[in-house]
Amino acid sequence: MATPALVQHVAWSSNCSVDKGNDFELTLPNATLSGNCLILCCQYPSAATLASTPITDNIGNTWPTTPTKSVTDSGNGMTQAVFILPNATAGVTKIQFAFTASQYGFTANFQEWCNIATSSPEDGSAAQLNTTTTLTSGSFNTTTNGDLILQFIGCTDNGE
């Protein structure tokens, strides 16, 4: 398989602690390409309940209903979760993320990658809460050579 390449990346910071919201709409700068892998890394209050179908898009892809990996900071009441959609249909320009009730503090990072396996692209994962300035993701083993390894880092105390 060819070397994975980042097609687009977008970061959103939403309502922080100002206004409650729900059904957060994330607009992409470019339409997605056929067969690419879409990754959405979100951060939200750990007490929040995801809607039964938390992620939808304007093309009708079937996003996973549970995160591929997540970690919760119970001290600050925030969760960071990663959702992966392999083999996406071309043309996604809007993604909607929903909870069962309005929330404060939703943020998201979106990435589109090409040259990623079109089914079961996950080959290992780890999640770890760090409470010092030394950041580690935890260890994991892969089974395939040439894997793309991503690390998402979030600040769950809203910088306070």
Image: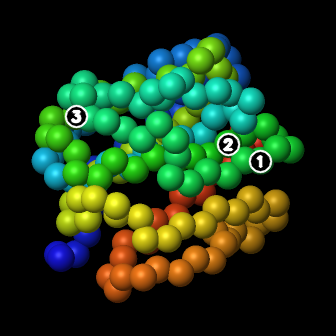
- Which residue corresponds to the image point at 62% horizontal and 46% vertical from the top-left? 80
Disc 1 marks which amino acid?
A: Asp
In-image side of 36 versus 157 (left or right): left
| Vertical position of residue 53 compared to residue 37: above or below | above
Horizontal and vertical percent for residue 45? 70, 32
Quarter of the image where the C terminus is located? top right
Percent of width and height locating residue 12: 47, 35
Image coordinates of residue 63 in percent, x first then y, are 36, 38
Q: Residue 73: give its label.
A: 1
Q: CA distance from mark 2 to mark 3?
A: 26 Å
Q: Nearer the viewer, residue 29 or 26?
A: 26
| First reached walking from the N terminus: tag 2 or tag 3 | 2
Mark 3 — residue? 92
Q: Given contact means CB atoms under 8 Å apart, are the residues at marks 2 and 3 in contact?
A: no
Q: Is residue 84 visible?
A: yes
> What residue is shown at x 40% (from left), y 50% (from top)?
84
